[in-house]
Amino acid sequence: MNDNLDAFFKPRAVALIGASQKELSIGNVIIKNLIHYKFQGPVYPINPKVDEIRGLKAYPSIMDVPGEVDLVHIVIPPPFVPEEVESCGKKGVKAIIVNTAGFKEMGAEGKALEDDFLARAKKYGIRIVGPNCQGTINSDPAFNAYCNFTFTYPEPGHISVVAQSGGVGAVIMQAFYDMGIGQRMYASNGNGSDVSITEIISYYGKDDETRAIVLYAESLENPKEFIETAKKVTARKPILAITAGRTDKGAEASRSHIGGLAGSISMELIYKKAGILTFGSQEDLCHAAVALSSQPMPKGNKVGIITNTGGPSVIAIDELVSCGLEIPPLSEKAAEALKGTMLESASIRNPLDVVATAGPGHFKSALAVMMNEPQFDSIYLNFVTPPFVDCENVAREIAAAAKAGDKPIVCNYMTDKQKWGGTSKILKEGEIPCFDFAETAARALHALVRYNNIRSAKTGEVKHFTDVNTGVVRTILDNARLKGRDVLTAAEVYGILEAYCVPVASWKVTENVASAVAAASEIGYPVVIKADSSAIIHKSDVGGVAINIQNAEEAEKVAAAMQSKLGSDIRFFVQKFLPKGRELIIGAKATEGVGHIIMFGLGGIFVEILKDVVFSISPVSDEEAKEMIGGIKASALIHGFRGESGINQEKTVEIIQRISMLCCDFPEIKELDLNPLFASGNEICAVDARMIL
Amino acid sequence: MNDNLDAFFKPRAVALIGASQKELSIGNVIIKNLIHYKFQGPVYPINPKVDEIRGLKAYPSIMDVPGEVDLVHIVIPPPFVPEEVESCGKKGVKAIIVNTAGFKEMGAEGKALEDDFLARAKKYGIRIVGPNCQGTINSDPAFNAYCNFTFTYPEPGHISVVAQSGGVGAVIMQAFYDMGIGQRMYASNGNGSDVSITEIISYYGKDDETRAIVLYAESLENPKEFIETAKKVTARKPILAITAGRTDKGAEASRSHIGGLAGSISMELIYKKAGILTFGSQEDLCHAAVALSSQPMPKGNKVGIITNTGGPSVIAIDELVSCGLEIPPLSEKAAEALKGTMLESASIRNPLDVVATAGPGHFKSALAVMMNEPQFDSIYLNFVTPPFVDCENVAREIAAAAKAGDKPIVCNYMTDKQKWGGTSKILKEGEIPCFDFAETAARALHALVRYNNIRSAKTGEVKHFTDVNTGVVRTILDNARLKGRDVLTAAEVYGILEAYCVPVASWKVTENVASAVAAASEIGYPVVIKADSSAIIHKSDVGGVAINIQNAEEAEKVAAAMQSKLGSDIRFFVQKFLPKGRELIIGAKATEGVGHIIMFGLGGIFVEILKDVVFSISPVSDEEAKEMIGGIKASALIHGFRGESGINQEKTVEIIQRISMLCCDFPEIKELDLNPLFASGNEICAVDARMIL
């Protein structure tokens, strides 16, 4: 990874190969954007057929450009791109944005052209953004680099955006613009043939003026590298992402199938592992970015509310509480202090309703008291602009209080922004994050709390168990592979689990009926007897499973019946039959580029009817395992219910971690399911398991 | 209810008692609003100390006004209000908006003043909006009546708003304004001392120009009347409401406690019963109103998608699918038709990606084919405005397609509305509902489908069971009341249930140990024996409950032990002990003004851990009962799971309806809980029940 992307974001000169005089063309729009956005260096249109474009001298080829060129746009059709990249190499160009579409995404021919230009770029050390992309923007007045064919001209600010989809990137950029919020850098890298989203995030991470990063990705080239990089960035500044493809249909549309149970959820898990804040809606994400890029972090989830109107504070409280935030009462001291300064009709509690007729003095006092209440970590403000109040001075009090204090403020600012232009300007200059609705302001505040939680969360320890026997597992897996088997036998599965000290019900594999009966006696009745043959997949369908066998007589009868039905060469898998406790399920599934996704849930109806399962990417730390257990909807059952005993959490955490370690040590394990484990009293024990390579 | 509110919305002349020259005062702002909004009749400021206000001649009192006055604002302090109402009566005023606050909401003194002016108004047949309110607005150019102190001047349109909280009303009005969406009428009635929200809704319902009604209420004076009125309105046009106070903290803030398990949910249930569309966010509500007031209803939930950008269609699909909408594939015929007209890089399927370079011709063809696909009920459009495309003509094609077709269209319109002003105007004139984000457009489309579902849903039948014995119940209840008891004995509860033919486990009440044993033999072992005394509330805590008694010897021992522990005067409640089946819970709770709220759920962990219960307001129809059963999260269990039998739905529906009828017949029943009922095989049977008056 090379995250020096200065040539894309801080180019000193830009050329455009495929520049055009036709207004409705990309080759013209990019020139227009560079000029209108006041790019600080020279712009060189390249077109052999014309002399000038939009008043700029055009050059027949990149080689004819007099000065050095850091960045080149290429907008000509795909077949001509490789040659132009070659020319750029000769010219000493550092970076190219290939806006043209029609490469890898269109099939083999396009893929060949993409490979061709990439090889040439590599030869000259040129970095490529694209193809099939918009490009980059840097609002830094030292550059004013609008190397992009979109239409929103962001003011300078502290939010940087990277979007795989230019459409989504454009929407987000426009949303900030419409809110009057500045932006720092922007990039949409399309096919991502060279410069990756990971590199761009790393670059933004090192940019001091970037305080929050907005990300839209439908897939990632190298999720492990992404997680490592993003983790470092999120420790310093927030990354906010939309989880695209969260439904199967959505995932299908984004063509980023990962498939199966852990399918469309893996982007969500990747983001979680990296400490990225995810959002279900672009608008919520934009609002959160505004708050995160302007406010200090709250120390906790306790909110003090000031309002000058009733209804919106009901809505705000509904939303705050739904988000898990708390609205503690005012202290007596604070209430006492406010009694002297508020209007008679004010409601002195939390929410503090200063009422609509409250003026600057009332707000000043309210803010001073609420900001100083030690039990509030943040301030939520409802500010409607009554036409009979001196709102500009109210705004000045809000801005002053924010500046003086170290608690974040969010404001539901209810106004006509044209008519109250002066008030709006004061709030903007005071960097007060203002939102049009109580719910959106509440959710933005929630995002601040979420980021604080992420930053202050214990990451936990990925335990390395030294009591495991990797040799045994290696031998079993190699042996299965040698025999061309993907589905392991019960004996193999239990052998592997035992080698990793995962508790399983006592078992034995025996060769004939007599030894099966002997094994059953050794294990102790009741037992389960299964036909042990990898040739039989659905054992219970063919009479290959018998449970709750009480004695030797029954065992012999059952085993003999199996033999006569399924062939004399079958072996018998004999296992202790355990009384049914609370069922658990722990699973693992290898996921391309990510590693294994580990699943945890309660078995039976909880997984089958209520889909109450949680996932985490391996390696799973102890804290992550605890979070998984606490993360199921029925987690209260862990602590027992109606006299049924709970589940030993420590042991469950350990088993999750041992499964995680097993998968990390043996990546060839494609799927592993312990379903169910029985948890009863303090014991947990796998009673059925399967494994696929 | 008198819903002729013309004097408020269509006044011919307006006076303002308490008019002021001071700009930052309500008495000045209302005059300003009437003038600026171009009120079509005369405006009479009333102020004995000045001659003119904002260029209008001021009058010393309402009696001095030369012409007739339909509507008067009163903004003077509370103590002076009754007298002015009296004067208005003498003058022949039809309607008064009391903007002044400080009445009922401030305590007894204010309440007395409110009662005083109400009595005087009634004497003269004057209707009152307020006190403690904003007032009304009518954008009809024949009136331009801005009788309100807020600041948003809506353009004429088809959405009417009624808000108990003026703050929320102002936010919603401003939101429509910011979206460029016209509005029809507006009212915020504050304390609602006279004109009620129900009357305003009824009035809007009869206004032909109102196509959608937006409602914000935290409480309702007469929920039953509201439900009846709103039902009639929602059959003709949609009502959209925010559910305020959906959290306990929120409900507390709104002071509209209803209390207990069915507390903050009752507004939601009232709205559901009335066929009102509810929203968790004001913004979603506003977006839905825009779609509902401009588009035809979809016939179903199947959506065809046209997009000129990739990412936003992934987000749209995620949201549409999450909302339960379907994205069926294109027919072969349609795909074939599109192959000839789309760009080479277009993706011909559903979503149909026409790609960013698509021009008006491509959109025209795409719209024609998609609008004509019989399997699509609606069209979702992603339209980003590429600077290299003739977007105005694309917009014309969209507007033309909408006009020609009978399917609703919603559009995620991604643009800079200033730069693409022409395009935006064409879409607006074509009444295409445009939204800034894919999610919001998708949710607006979902609202159209929801309203169609409400309108086409079977309301079902409230069954009147003729086999019940009301006389028995009357006697039991009267007897309990005579004895001053609120908590009924088991025998009373089961007697009532049996009188309403609700199946209960066989039972008998006996006077002494010997007769208890005899009763047990008669019922058949195993049995349950309980000490039957209303003096003992928590029977099991004091050893007053014994279950699973297998024979006479055990029964005698148990009964004797209870007697020696709890006193020789106790009686014994003997009941059949049933094998545990799937547990159900059915409950009812009387709720002020609403009637009874009926609850249904699965018992045990489903209610206690997963809170998986549903509610409905009585009387519950058969369709509503079915919807309740299907509405729990674990509803799949109704059909059985892993060999366990399912639950007889018909019988469950009947029991819910019988409980509903019992509560309607005997409103004095405060709480009733059948918890649990055992459902096993085809049978359902209450095995424990309690009832409180």
Image (cartoon, coloured by chain):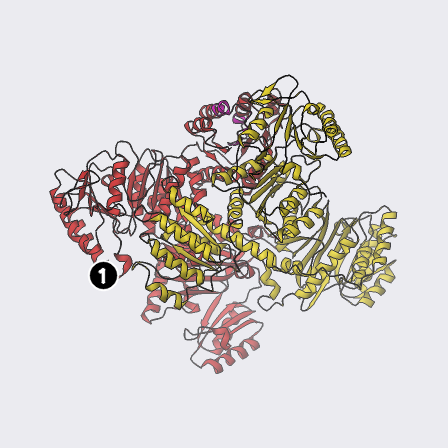
Chain colours: A red, B yellow
User: Is residue A464 visible in the rendered structure shown here?
Assistant: no
Between B598 and A669, the one lying in front of the other is: B598
Residue with the most extreme bottom position: A564
Between B686 and B311, the one lying in front of the other is: B311
Which residue is under mark 1?
A: A109
Q: Which residues are magenta?
A: A370-397
When the figure is inspected, residue B167 is found, relative to residue A364, above or below; the finding is below
Q: How many numbered markers are drawn?
A: 1
Rendered residue at 55%/64% (across/down):
A578
Between A371 and A73, the one lying in front of the other is: A73
User: Is residue A164 visible in the rendered structure shown here?
Assistant: yes
When the figure is inspected, residue B239 is found, relative to residue B513, above or below; the finding is above
Q: Amino acid at mark 1?
A: Glu
Kindly indicate the quadrant of the structure image that contains residue A328.
Answer: top right
Q: Position of residue B370 (x, y in %)?
A: 42, 60
Kindly indicate the quadrant of the structure image that contains residue A146.
Answer: top left
Numbered disc 1: secondary structure: helix
How would you rate the neighbour count of disc 1 (Cα within 10 Å): few for under 14, some for 14-19, many for 20 or more? some
Quadrant into which the N terminus of chain B falls:
top right
Q: Position of residue A258 (x, y in %)?
A: 38, 58
Q: Position of residue B212 (x, y in %)?
A: 57, 47
Kindly indicate the quadrant of the structure image that contains residue B450.
Answer: bottom right
The chain letter for the residue carrying disc 1 is A
Q: Position of residue A491 (x, y in %)?
A: 43, 68
- Magenta highlight on residue A371: yes
Give the side of residue A514 with respect to residue B266, left or right.
left
Give the side of residue B588 with respect to residue A647, left or right.
right
- Magenta highlight on residue B65: no
Between B432 and B249, the one lying in front of the other is: B432
